[in-house]
Amino acid sequence: MGKITQIHLISLGGIHMSFASNSAINKKVNWGIMGTGWIADRFASDLQYVTNGEAVAVGSRTIESASKFAENMNIPIAYGTYEELVTDPNIDVIYIGTPHPFHIEHVTLALQAGKSVLCEKPFTVNAAELEKLIELAREKNVFMMEAMWTRFLPAIVKVREWIQQGCIGEVKQVRAEFGFQSEWNPQGRLLNPELGGGALLDAGIYPISFAAMIFGAKPIHISSTAEIGQTGVDEHFTALLDYGSGQAALLSGAVRLDLNNDAYIYGTKGHIHIPTFLYANEATLQVNDEDAQLFTAPRSSHGYAYEAEEVGRLILDGQKESSVISLDESLNIIRILDKMREQWGLKYPFE
Ligand SMILES: NC(=O)c1ccc[n+]([C@@H]2O[C@H](COP(=O)([O-])OP(=O)(O)OC[C@H]3O[C@@H](n4cnc5c(N)ncnc54)[C@H](OP(=O)(O)O)[C@@H]3O)[C@@H](O)[C@H]2O)c1
């Protein structure tokens, strides 16, 4: 390998400057935050870096939790029920940060109130649930998107550009994984079947969505294996997705095993490496014998500001979905997860 040239992205408070040129720059969307857990905290805190939106209210199942969250995040209104949150006429879009088995109920609540929705991954626990939500969002004619935040990170946007420009030729293989060793907590969200636990829905959706970003979400053949642990959910898995024409993805996910978490894309003219691809703030392009190109995009936010900025831009522009992660693509990705669970005989108690 020769020397590495560096491309450094200049950022504005964590957001790429190109966002600042959108036509709706002077307008803002009003966000309502549903849930006050781990991810809601990070997402709400990242809204401070967003130029076209702000959090105007938070809703929780208890007023105590809503009030504490609102105070910490400097959000003006706290509601002690999700119903009050979604019926606040001042809110344009609801961010859903509740555990995945409740997404169907909570997204439905927001859509019925005529609100746009950004829903945490996985959108739903199975494809049948997501089909219903997509139908309702289209009937209500509001914006809806799965919070697949990784796709909006500048390093991942650059990777898509490199691929579209043919920098590595025809893409043949993708390898990606996301896994961590969580503590043994059978009641917690990660291992509890009642809360949709397991590696696939929590962590595994990231590498599967990553492969879908490159090859599409309709592999012709899926083979997978998982270890089903004591609580009855998958603690780790590996999947081989065959897309035909020699294109394939080897993917792993885990909630009881530390994985390396990098992603690699191999093409006929070179390859791309993304360290810790889920949180990517850099990527390297290696074209055959040329010097490697390192793209870096340091940020101040946790990384959720990019998806929020894009959702704001699309809503202000009157769009109903994102072309970066469309509703049909999210649905096809959940169909892959359904198929894999079928291969392992894993059904949740509420299914
Ligand atoms: N994008 C990412 O990087 C990322 C990271 C982690 C998790 N996630 C996703 O975000 C979702 C939430 O994960 P989390 O780790 O934030 O979970 P969490 O810390 O357990 O928080 C979930 C919140 O949902 C609300 N909730 C409503 N009904 C609930 C119920 N029956 N049981 C428990 N909580 C309930 C609670 O808020 P109130 O008490 O205020 O109502 C709770 O604080 C999951 O779908 C997960 O896959 C995404």
Image (tube, rainbow, N blue to C red):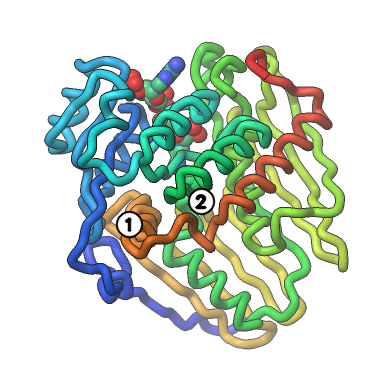
* Residue lying at 46% horizontally and 55% vertically, measured from the top left: 320
- Three-letter code for the amino acid on which mark 1 is drawn: Gly
Q: Residue at x 75, y 56 (%)?
A: 249
Q: Which mark is residue 278?
A: 2
Label 1's element? helix
Quarter of the image with the C terminus is top right
Residue 336 in picture, x, y percent from top left: 73, 43
Dot 1, crowdedness within 10 Å: few (<14), some or many (≥20)? many
Q: Residue furthest bottom?
A: 290
On screen, residue 75 above or below 208: above
In the image, which is nearer the foreground, mark 2 or mark 1? 1
User: Percent from the top left, x then y, of residue 227?
Assistant: 75, 26
Is label 2 in contact with label 1 (beta carbons under 8 Å)? no
Q: Which residue corresponds to mark 1?
A: 312
Q: Is residue 257 visible?
A: no
Q: Is residue 189 visible?
A: yes
Q: Is residue 235 above or below residue 288?
A: above
Position of the N terminus, as image quadrant, is bottom right
Which image quadrant shows ligand 1? top left
The crowd level at tag 2 (other Cα within 10 Å; few <14, some 14-19, many 20+) is many
Q: Earlier in the sequence, mark 2 or mark 1?
A: 2
In this view, the residue in front, 126 or 240, is 126
Secondary structure, mark 2, is: helix
| Amino acid type assigned to the residue bearing label 2 in the image | Leu
Relative to 338, 310 lies left or right: left
**Furthest residue toward front:** 139
Q: Quadrant of residue 315?
A: bottom left
- The image quadrant that residue 306 belongs to is bottom left
Question: Assess mark 2: CB under 8 A from ligand 1?
Answer: yes
Residues under labels 2 and 1: Cα distance? 22 Å
User: Looking at the image, which residue is at 61% across and 55% down?
Assistant: 210
**Residue 226, image x and y in percent?**
76, 31
